[in-house]
Image (cartoon, rainbow, N blue to C red):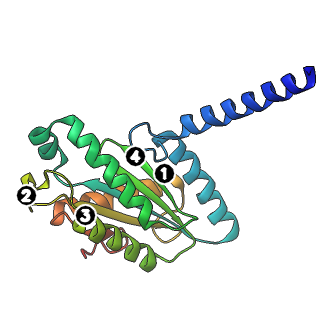
Amino acid sequence: VANVVKERRLRRQAAEGQFYKELSRKDGLTELYNHRFFHQLLETEVGRATRYGRSVNLIMIDIDHFKQYNDAHGHPAGDMALRKLAHVLKRCIRGCDYVARYGGEEFAIIVPEIEVRAARGMAERVRRLVDETEFEGEEVMPLGRLTVSLGVAALPVHASSKEELVDRADQALYAAKAASRNCVVVAEDDSVN
């Protein structure tokens, strides 16, 4: 009997440990990876890509005019939109990709081992799928629907370190927002799609 009780206690402790480990990695609202764990994952993927001479892409995503949505509907509706967007993003990634809530209404996808053109194609699929998804109350948005802007950068094409990769993807994202929003910009050529 003592062994059974001890075994149950050990299983419960292991389950609790796993629960708290997952909790520390996930964003409470969207259940995507959180900002801190995103940086750990990106560090690992950049290290792997550098070691084996492979590529890793980073797609930064920001909801266009999200403040306008929140102002019109309130933060609870904004939270629902963020959760729905997280679900859309999860549908767009491969099993080896990682999607995280970077902060506020900004998200990031780590895309290892594909070429920049394929990462741009993935970003465009994300943009289209978000554009086609119905979000409650989106008619208040400038285009009458909720949209996203995306920036893409790749290591080693655009960057040679994790920090530089984040910076280049972020610059591409801001170029997309400055261009027309609801578009994809790749760091290399800053061309709008």
- Marks 4/3: CA–CA distance: 21 Å
Q: Give the secondary structure at mark 3.
A: loop
Question: Disc 3 or 1, which lies upstream in sequence?
Answer: 3
- Marks 3/2: CA–CA distance: 16 Å
Q: Position of residue 51 (x, y in %)?
A: 69, 64
Select label 3 or label 2 by which is in front. 3
Residue 176 horizontal side relative to residue 93, left or right: left
Question: Disc 4 or 3, which lies upstream in sequence?
Answer: 4
Foreground of the two, 97 or 152: 97
Question: Contact (CB < 8 A) between labels 4 and 3?
Answer: no
Image quadrant assignment for residue 193:
bottom left
Depicted 100 relative to depicted 91: above or below: above
Residue positioned 56% across, 65% down in the render: 95
Question: Contact (CB < 8 A) between labels 2 and 1?
Answer: no
The amino acid type of the residue labelled 2 equals: Pro
Select label 1 or label 4 by which is in front. 4
The residue where tag 3 is placed is 133
The residue where tag 2 is placed is 142
Q: Residues within 10 Å of mark 2 (few under 14, many from 20)?
A: few
The amino acid type of the residue labelled 4 equals: Tyr
The amino acid type of the residue labelled 3 equals: Thr
Q: Position of residue 36 (x, y in %)?
A: 51, 40
The residue where tag 1 is placed is 163
Mark number displayed over residue 102: 4
Question: Contact (CB < 8 A) between labels 1 and 4?
Answer: no
Q: Position of residue 17 (x, y in %)?
A: 68, 31
- Marks 2/1: CA–CA distance: 33 Å
Q: How many numbered callouts? A: 4
Residue positioned 14% across, 60% down in the render: 145
Q: Position of residue 1 (x, y in %)?
A: 91, 22
- Marks 1/4: CA–CA distance: 14 Å
